[in-house]
């Protein structure tokens, strides 16, 4: 067991400052200041000060009672709580990733927040708030090093694993890509439409409203821009390291071999520029409420060759675009008139690939060794058309894999083959390893399908 | 209009049923499951019908009350028949390397789980299930979307299935 450590002593102050705006707005909105006459005519200012001092005192005790240390098994322990004591043990062998984030207020004080992510646990109780930035980075390196089995001598600082920058997303690219998303374009087209309708009908109130609609795309694009600003992907011995964010700086690590499935998206308007986005499912990334803090987007926008190179890092030896895909039969157009040309499925000895989507065509890739189960589904309309859909289940995450509206007979064969390949790949590769042996029979190629990536 | 003709051309493949069993066939579930589900599903329908009929009859609209009775009986009968069919549509097949579960009449589903991917196997028994001597076996993989549930098993069969699946799972992932 190591000496228990505290978070940074400025933490209670930051908590106080963070609480202030909410408190002030809250008191003004509820008119709480007027209710203070029984407190001896404190007034609004006095009430706010009183509550702030209360918050500060609580924050101070929270700070004194939060300690963290390594126990005798070498796992991280976090003890916290003023009234309810919470003793959390972070089993480092189960560590998925370690995030260092800098919310804007923490950044003003040169502080950072550290979140070790463990499979299945909510990150709320695991958060270390706040540490000096260097301490947070040091601790992260230490945790990751311990997690990968390098138990360090006590007190010997661990060098941050050296990293090599793979991709940096230029800000103009990011901004352009966000503006060219179907949702943004739709909103931008909506504004002149509303204004024109208002003009023709002579409803000037509606016209004013239409102009205010400008805020919708600006908010969406602005929010995403701030979130993914300065997106950097680096390769380090701990895995893929992602850093991004302007107002709130994030740093995420995807340990090697934890990527379960990959999605490559190419919104329609990105096609002329040859841009794509890359999204992944990472093992253990469960729990919805804080989903955005777990690695999902590993590349918000990049030219296809860059994305392909990055793909080699997360799924070595896999090139989903060289996979021969079988298009859905012509009857699929009656079930999916907009996207039927995109619908396709294929498999190699290592991965299963599906394609779908109309405004945002998506390529979903799941290695056979990461296939959990397979589902075959058929509704009444699909049945009448002789179609059925195959879903391949991956761990929870933003990527879902579906071969939609394939020929019914072929779909059953496909489902069975994928189940067989999953079983085989599992036996040959083993858990937690990146699987790279060619296994299982490939689907008989059926060339002559439509819209492949250029 | 060439499109509808092409649709006609697809019709023969309607005979392709992707949900047919292999040589082993589907193991059906216990028909008492239909009783449990009817009890749960029809109680509300019967109650609503009774309340409506009584209210209408007392309120001075006996003709409408009669209509409500007919409608209620019709719905009850249809649900009775539907639940029976749904339960008969559930089947599973323990194969060498994977477990298959089939269900649904209109929206049909087939789940295929390789034994090596099973994380845990649950046996659940609710109060009604216990009363009717039934149990539900549910398979979990690392994916939340895996929906492999076999309801309506006798408790002995459920226990045996769980142990067998667990053993097979162990075997399949042991040879790593």
Image (spheres, coloured by chain):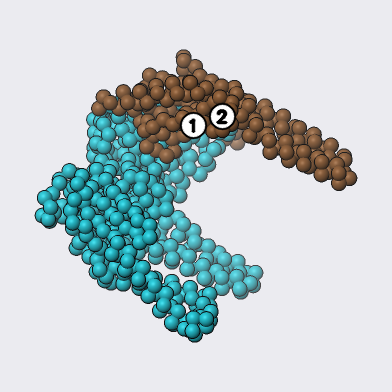
Label of residue A246 in the image: none
Location of residue A256 in the rendering, given as x and y in whole percent from the top left corner: 23, 43
Kindly identify which chain the residue marked by label 2 belongs to. Answer: B
Chain letter, cyan: A
| Residue situated in front as seen by the camera: A230 or A372 | A372
Location of residue A9 in the rendering, given as x and y in whole percent from the top left corner: 25, 68
Total marks shown come to: 2
Describe residue A223's horizontal placement relative to residue B28 as left or right: left
Q: Alpha-carbon neighbours of circle 1 within 10 Å: few (<14), some, or many (≥20)?
A: some
What residue is drawn where x is 46% and y is 40%? A341
Quarter of the figure with residue A342: top left
Which sits earlier in the primary sequence, circle 1 or circle 2? 1
Kindly identify which chain the residue marked by label 1 belongs to. Answer: B
Chain letter, brown: B
What residue is drawn where x is 24% and y is 62%? A6
Answer whether residue A231 is visible to the viewer in this image: no
Label of residue B129 in the image: 2
Location of residue A3 in the rendering, given as x and y in whole percent from the top left corner: 18, 56
Quarter of the figure with residue B100: top left
Describe residue B76's horizontal placement relative to residue A264 as left or right: right
Element assignment for label 1:
strand
According to the picture, the residue beneath numbered tag 1 turns out to be B124
Location of residue A127 in the rendering, given as x and y in whole percent from the top left corner: 31, 57
Element assignment for label 2:
helix
Above or below residue A68? Residue B56 is above
| Residue situated in front as seen by the camera: A232 or A330 | A232
Q: Marks 1 and 2: CB-CB under 8 Å? A: yes
Above or below residue A332? Residue A158 is below
Q: Which quarter shows the C terminus of chain A? A: top left
What residue is drawn where x is 54% and y is 33%? B126
């Amino acid at each position: 067991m190591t000496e228990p450590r505290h978070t940074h002593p400025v933490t209670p102050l930051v908590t106080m400052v963070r609480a202030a705006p909410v408190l002030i707005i809250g008191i003004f909105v509820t008119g709480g200041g007027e209710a203070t006459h029984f407190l001896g005519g404190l007034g609004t200012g006095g009430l706010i000060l009183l509550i702030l001092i209360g918050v500060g005192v609580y924050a101070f005790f929270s700070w004194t009672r939060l300690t963290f240390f390594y126990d005798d098994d070498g796992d991280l322990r976090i003890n916290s709580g003023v009234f309810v004591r919470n003793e959390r043990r972070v089993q480092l062998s189960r560590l998925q990733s370690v995030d260092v984030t800098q919310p804007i207020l923490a950044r003003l004080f040169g502080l950072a927040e550290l979140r070790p992510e463990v499979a299945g646990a909510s990150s709320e109780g695991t958060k270390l708030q706040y540490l000096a930035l260097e301490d947070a980075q040091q601790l992260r390196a230490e945790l990751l090093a311990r997690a990968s089995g390098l138990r360090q001598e006590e007190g010997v600082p661990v060098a941050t694993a050296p990293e090599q920058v793979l991709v940096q997303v230029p800000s103009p690219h990011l901004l352009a890509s966000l503006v060219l998303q179907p949702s943004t374009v739709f909103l931008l087209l909506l504004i002149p439409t509303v204004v024109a309708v208002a003009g023709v009908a002579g409803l000037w109130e509606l016209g004013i409203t239409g102009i205010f609609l400008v805020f919708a795309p600006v908010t969406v694009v602005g929010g995403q821009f701030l979130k993914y600003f300065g997106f950097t992907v680096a390769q380090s011995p701990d895995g893929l390291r992602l850093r991004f964010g302007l107002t709130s700086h994030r740093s995420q690590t995807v340990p090697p071999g934890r990527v379960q499935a990959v999605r490559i998206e190419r919104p329609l308007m990105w096609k002329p520029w040859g841009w794509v986005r890359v999204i992944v499912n990472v093992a253990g990334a469960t729990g919805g409420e804080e989903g955005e803090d777990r690695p999902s987007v590993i590349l918000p926008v990049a030219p296809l060759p860059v994305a392909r190179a990055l793909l080699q890092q997360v799924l070595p030896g896999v090139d989903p675009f060289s996979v021969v895909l079988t298009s859905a039969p012509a009857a699929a157009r009656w079930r999916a008139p907009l996207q039927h040309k995109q619908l396709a499925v294929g498999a190699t000895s290592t991965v299963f690939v599906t394609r779908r989507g109309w405004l945002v065509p998506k390529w979903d890739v799941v290695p056979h060794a990461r296939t959990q189960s397979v589902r075959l589904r058929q509704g009444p309309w699909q049945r009448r058309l002789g179609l059925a859909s195959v879903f391949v289940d991956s761990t929870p995450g933003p990527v879902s894999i579906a071969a939609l509206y394939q020929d019914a007979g072929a779909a059953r064969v496909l489902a069975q083959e994928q189940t067989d390949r999953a079983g085989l790949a599992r036996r040959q590769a083993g858990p937690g390893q990146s699987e790279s042996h060619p296994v299982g029979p490939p689907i008989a190629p059926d060339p002559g399908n439509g819209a492949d990536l250029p | 209009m060439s499109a509808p003709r092409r649709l006609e051309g697809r019709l023969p493949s309607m005979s392709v049923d992707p949900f047919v069993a292999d040589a082993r066939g589907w193991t059906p579930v216990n028909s008492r499951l239909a009783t449990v589900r009817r009890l749960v599903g029809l109680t509300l329908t019967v109650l609503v019908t009774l309340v409506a009929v009584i209210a209408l009859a007392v309120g001075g609209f006996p003709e409408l009350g009669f209509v409500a009775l007919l409608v209620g009986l019709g719905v009850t009968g249809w649900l009775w028949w539907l639940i029976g069919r749904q339960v008969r549509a559930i089947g599973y097949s323990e194969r060498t390397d994977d477990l298959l579960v089939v269900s649904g009449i209109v929206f049909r589903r087939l789940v295929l789980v390789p034994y090596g991917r099973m994380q845990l196997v649950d046996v659940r028994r609710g109060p009604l299930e216990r009363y009717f001597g039934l149990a539900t076996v549910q398979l979990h993989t690392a994916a939340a979307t895996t929906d492999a549930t076999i309801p309506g098993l006798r408790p002995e069969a459920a226990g045996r299935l769980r142990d067998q699946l667990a053993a097979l799972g162990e075997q399949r992932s042991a040879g790593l």
